[in-house]
């Protein structure tokens, strides 16, 4: 094909084809153990996470030394109020971060990076993000999902030597997958990469390119057409932003994270050398998903920082503010919120550190753990921030600038709420994470019984699947009846002044109950199971709570063994587990007692206009324009707002 070939229109994709594309991108095999996968199967493998894994002494020393330098920098050089007011991180701050090596935290030292572990990388993101969430996003988008991570996992030696030293010290990178009409359904990806000699020619438009406005290097996902000598499929490329035909058409603005450099990027006949292709043709989605296995852990890191700040402000404010003769903290309605923030912050740090250390050790497959950490942390951090605003009352709704202007401490509680909201959408929305995790959680069932519920399989395939399923379930189901959770002496090493052993027994019992519930649902709905998204979401949420309970108990025992606030850690873990158990029991009730069927009927009525009368009596302040912007390939008609920082 020549470079002048007109790019094809957006692919017409059926629901089944979309699922097949997503399924093909999944890691198909489990070569390493997974604590969370076992948990969903009713097997509580505490041995996989306890004793709590720890970083090597040398890695810890290197990490602590960098954290000290980073703390000094953000305390003395970062003006968070200025970033919020100007909606931009000053160039001198970005230059200072480059000099500090913050853009190379995850890059190996042989390429000029700092070579930090995932644990210390996340601690650094928490620290930087607490100074300014926009800085945390800048650093994370650059190296959690930008050029460094895909090259680390899939790049050639030549690519690593070419690009990683630049990413470590001078160049900013971004990851480009989303398009104006393509979000979590990549089968409809329209950006094309047409082979032409030793190059590919890119055409298309990418939306919400975090760091894209200031990036020097881009990881771009584009569809290569099948042809002679070309397997085709969605493929990853490293693209120089200053290449002819690359235009940053807009710097987007959001309700929060005002300082991030997020844009719309158009590619028109952009020539990319074949040497810049990452992996093979058709491997793009696999590269993206594999990158996100650990890349998603940057979001929990920012949520941990948010929880710590919420706790600090809640403690200081609630002790100073008096109502009806005593500090508001001593009123039960406020005190329960403070307890929730404290216990949940402890659990989020436990989940994040545990998943990060498991990623560093590489003994376990953490695709579910990383996804659970992202899902759980983003939801709980949002709730904590909302509770902080409530504790602060009217001052929580008031901006920090307004508070300062009238002589009070400028506490940006409302900004935190705005900044955190995107975490429930970034890198997989909560709804998509539910489906992604649910698919992995039922993988064992589908691997033995999937052909039974596949309408396209032959009778012979179904008969073979039935035999395999009979063998699997004959061994598996009896193990769900009883376990260590029924023995009062189990997990006795967690029985101290505060007893956590009962919570671990609860986790063991409940994991078996969760597995039984999943089996009942598959038996009841079979092929229709995938459409029961409400049910699957609750199954996943129960698993997330069980994972968090396990991590909290294991972390408490680690701190006790190290003599590091062990008694207080046990208290926090105990409170968290008791709060979590209440949420779990409610979720189990809602598995079978809910309004899912009625909700679907109402939705049909809403979309058909049956309830349109309910919308009367308002005016719509929305502006004119299409719901989705035109992304037809072609030359840009807008000014290039690309702003490299040099």
Image: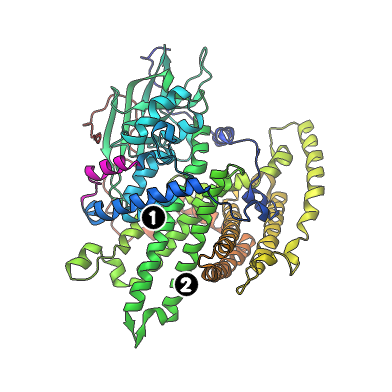
Image point (33%, 73%), residue name = 317
Label 2: which secondary element: helix
Please give the label number shown on residue 339: 2
Q: What stretch is highlighted in magenta?
A: 86-101
Left/right placement of residue 219 relative to residue 99 reads: right
Residue where numbered disc 1 is placed: 421
**Element type where label 1 sits in the image:** helix
Give the mark count. Answer: 2
| In the rendered image, the vertical position of residue 253 relative to residue 209, given as above or below | below
Asked if 9 appears above or below 561 in the picture, the reply is above
Q: Residue at x 25, y 63 (%)?
A: 399
**Colour convention:** rainbow
Quadrant for residue 7, please give it: top left
Comparing 459 with 245, the one in front is 245
190 or 324, nearer to the observer: 324
Residue 338 covered by magenta stretch: no
Above or below, comparing residue 166 to residue 533 in the picture: above
Give yes or no for residue 98 being in the magenta stretch.
yes
**Mark 1 or mark 2: which comes first in sequence?**
2
For the question of whether residue 225 can be seen, the reply is yes
| Front-most of residues 479 and 148 | 148
Q: Is the magenta stretch mostly helix, strand or loop?
A: helix
């Amino acid at each position: 094909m020549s470079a002048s070939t007109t790019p094809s229109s957006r692919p017409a994709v059926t629901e089944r084809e979309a699922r097949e594309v997503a399924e093909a991108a999944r890691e198909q095999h489990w070569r390493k153990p997974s604590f969370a996968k076992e948990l969903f199967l009713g097997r509580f493998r505490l041995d996989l996470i306890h004793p709590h894994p720890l970083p090597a002494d040398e890695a810890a020393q290197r990490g602590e030394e960098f954290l000290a330098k980073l703390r000094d920098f953000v305390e003395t050089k970062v003006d968070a109020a200025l970033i919020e007011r100007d909606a931009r991180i000053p160039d001198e701050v970005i230059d200072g971060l480059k000099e500090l090596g913050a853009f190379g935290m995850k890059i190996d030292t042989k390429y000029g990076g700092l070579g930090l572990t995932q644990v210390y990388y996340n601690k650094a993101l928490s620290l930087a993000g607490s100074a300014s969430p926009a800085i945390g996003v800048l650093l994370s988008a650059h190296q959690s999902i930008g050029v460094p991570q895909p090259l680390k996992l899939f790049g050639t030696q030549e690519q690593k030597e070419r690009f990683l030293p630049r990413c470590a010290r001078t160049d900013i990178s971004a990851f480009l997958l989303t398009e104006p009409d393509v979000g979590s359904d990549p089968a409809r990806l329209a950006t094309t990469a047409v082979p032409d000699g030793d190059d590919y020619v890119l055409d298309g438009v990418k939306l919400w390119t975090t760091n894209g406005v200031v990036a020097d290097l881009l990881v771009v996902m584009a569809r290569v057409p099948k042809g002679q000598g070309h397997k085709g499929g969605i493929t990853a490329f490293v693209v120089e932003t200053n290449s002819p035909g690359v235009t940053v058409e807009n710097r987007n603005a959001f309700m929060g994270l005002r300082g991030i450099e997020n844009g719309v990027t158009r590619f028109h006949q952009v020539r990319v050398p074949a040497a810049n292709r990452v992996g093979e043709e058709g491997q793009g989605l696999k590269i993206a998903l594999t990158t996100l296995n650990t890349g998603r852990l940057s979001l929990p890191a920012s949520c941990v920082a948010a929880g710590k700040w919420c706790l600090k402000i809640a403690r200081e404010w609630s002790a100073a503010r008096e109502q009806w003769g005593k500090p508001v903290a001593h009123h039960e309605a406020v005190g329960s919120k403070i307890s929730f923030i404290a216990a949940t912050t402890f659990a989020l740090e436990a989940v994040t550190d545990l998943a990060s250390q498991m990623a560093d050790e590489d003994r376990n497959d953490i695709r579910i753990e990383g996804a659970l950490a992202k899902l759980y942390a983003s939801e709980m951090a949002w709730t904590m921030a909302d509770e902080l605003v409530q504790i602060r009352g009217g001052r929580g709704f008031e901006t920090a600038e307004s508070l300062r202007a009238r002589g009070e401490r400028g506490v940006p509680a409302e900004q935190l709420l705005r900044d955190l909201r995107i975490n429930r959408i970034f890198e997989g929305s909560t709804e998509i994470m539910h489906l992604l995790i649910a698919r992995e959680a039922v993988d064992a069932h589908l691997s033995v019984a999937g052909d039974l519920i596949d309408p396209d399989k032959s009778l012979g395939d179904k008969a073979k699947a039935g035999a395999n399923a009979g063998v699997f379930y004959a061994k598996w189901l009896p193990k769900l009846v009883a376990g260590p959770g029924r023995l009062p002496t189990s997990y006795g090493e967690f029985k101290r002044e505060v007893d956590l052993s009962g919570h671990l027994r609860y986790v063991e019992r409940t994991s078996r109950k969760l597995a039984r519930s999943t089996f009942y649902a598959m038996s009841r709905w079979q092929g229709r199971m995938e459409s029961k998204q409400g049910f699957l979401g609750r199954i996943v949420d129960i698993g997330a709570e069980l994972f968090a309970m396990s991590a909290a108990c294991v972390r408490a025992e680690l701190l006790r063994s190290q003599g590091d606030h062990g008694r207080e850690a046990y208290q926090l873990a105990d409170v968290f587990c008791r709060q979590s158990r209440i949420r779990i029991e409610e979720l189990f009730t809602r598995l079978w007692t809910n309004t899912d069927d009625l909700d679907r009927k109402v939705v049909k009525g809403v979309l058909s206009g049956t309830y349109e009368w309910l919308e009367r009596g308002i005016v719509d302040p929305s502006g004119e324009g299409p719901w989705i912007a035109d992304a037809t390939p072609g030359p840009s008609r807008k000014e290039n707002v690309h702003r490299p920082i040099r």
